[in-house]
Image (spheres, rainbow, N blue to C red):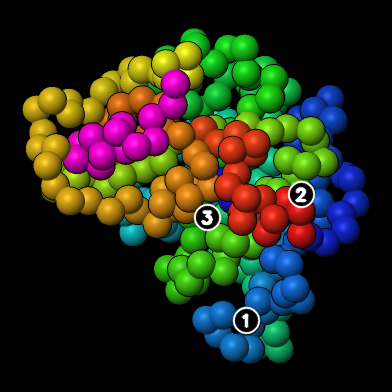
Amino acid sequence: MDILPTLAAMPDTPAAAPQGSAIHVPRATLPAGVDSLRTPHEAVRLEAVWARHQDDVREAQRLRWQIFAEEMGARLQPPADAPAGHDIDVFDAYCEHLLVRTLPTDGEPPRVVGTYRVLTPAAARLVGGLYTDTEFDITRLRGLRHRMVELGRSCTDAQWRTGGVMMMLWSSLAVFMHRNGLDLMIGCASVPMRDGGHAAASLWRRLAATHLAPIEHQVRARLPLPVDELRSDLDVEPPPLIKGYLKCGARVLGAPAWDPDFGCADLPLMLNLADLPAPYRRRFLDG
């Protein structure tokens, strides 16, 4: 949920966006002062773009399948008519899809190496709610829904997990939020449960003491991780994505939900752009 408006952007709506959403998205962004990104393969450049055609969305869905199903072992349940090897659910048709992809070279076509999907308040009304609603009772946030953008299905190709891809994604999100007058980001951040959930429970106990949202913004898991039955004394570092969100001022909205299909615990997080620490504000919003 870290962000940065950098390059000039043309207001436009992707072809896959629902009609009437009136959302403006940029064509491409890079972190400030960077013309292109060449890591980890020096000869390969990257660009951040918003999906404008169904083929673009399909590329993101293929990457998601590779990461979630093949690498993480998630039990995905796409629609019966979905193409094989694609992570697809009911929210996809209503979301904006942000991609980082390689630029073509003489020997290689472009390919997507990072993605987020973004559900706007208008689109959430059309689909009937947020993905977060399926995991948490967020009744206390009803007065904020008109300001909330939901981030989800974030993933990066294993060969590109150096931080640069995520920075490009966050940079584009900044422009998106700025241009559409939105200031709240919400989403479910996953914690692996390879140890049966003890690390997730311990992390929750730690973050509840340091990063818990005020009571008026707290939510309740529909399928709670049984944290009281798990160890809470482990010295656990947050996963990199969660650590990045917390550094930017995100708050934990409540105890984690258990997602048996993905085999993980999901922490509900929300970031108000007004809570960005001064160094991040200068870097991401005032640069």
Instruction: Compute the Cα span from label 3 to label 1.
Output: 23 Å
- Between label 3 and label 1, give the one nearer the viewer: 1
State left or right for residue 214 relative to residue 142: left
The part of the chain drawn in magenta is 201-214
Chief secondary structure of the magenta portion: helix
User: Where does the image place residue 260, in percent across and percent down from the top left?
Assistant: 26, 34
Residue positioned 63% across, 89% down in the render:
43
Residue 172 image position (x, y, % from top left): 71, 54
Crowding around mark 3 (Cα neighbors within 10 Å: few <14, some 14 to 19, many 20+) is some
Helix, strand or loop at label 1? It is: loop
Mark 2, residues whose alpha carbon is within 10 Å: few (<14), some, or many (≥20)? many
Out of 206 and 128, give the one closest to the viewer. 206
The residue indicated by pointer 2 is: 175
Of callouts 1 and 2, which one flags the residue occurring earlier in the amino acid sequence? 1
Q: Does residue 81 show up magenta in the picture?
A: no
- Please report whichever mark, 2 or 3, sits nearer to the chain's N-terminal start: 3
Residue mark closest to the camera, 2 vs 3: 2
Residue at the spot of label 1 = 38
The residue tagged 3 is 62
**Residue 252 shown left or right of residue 272 in the figure:** left
- Which comes before the other along the chain, label 3 or label 1? 1
Which residue occupies the foreground of this view, 64 or 3? 3
229 relative to 210, above or below = above
Q: Amino acid at mark 2?
A: Val
Residue 178's mark?
none
Q: Nearer the viewer, mark 1 or mark 2?
A: 2
Alpha carbon of mark 2 to alpha carbon of mark 3: how far?
26 Å
Dot 1 amino acid type: Arg
In the image, is residue 248 above or below residue 268? below
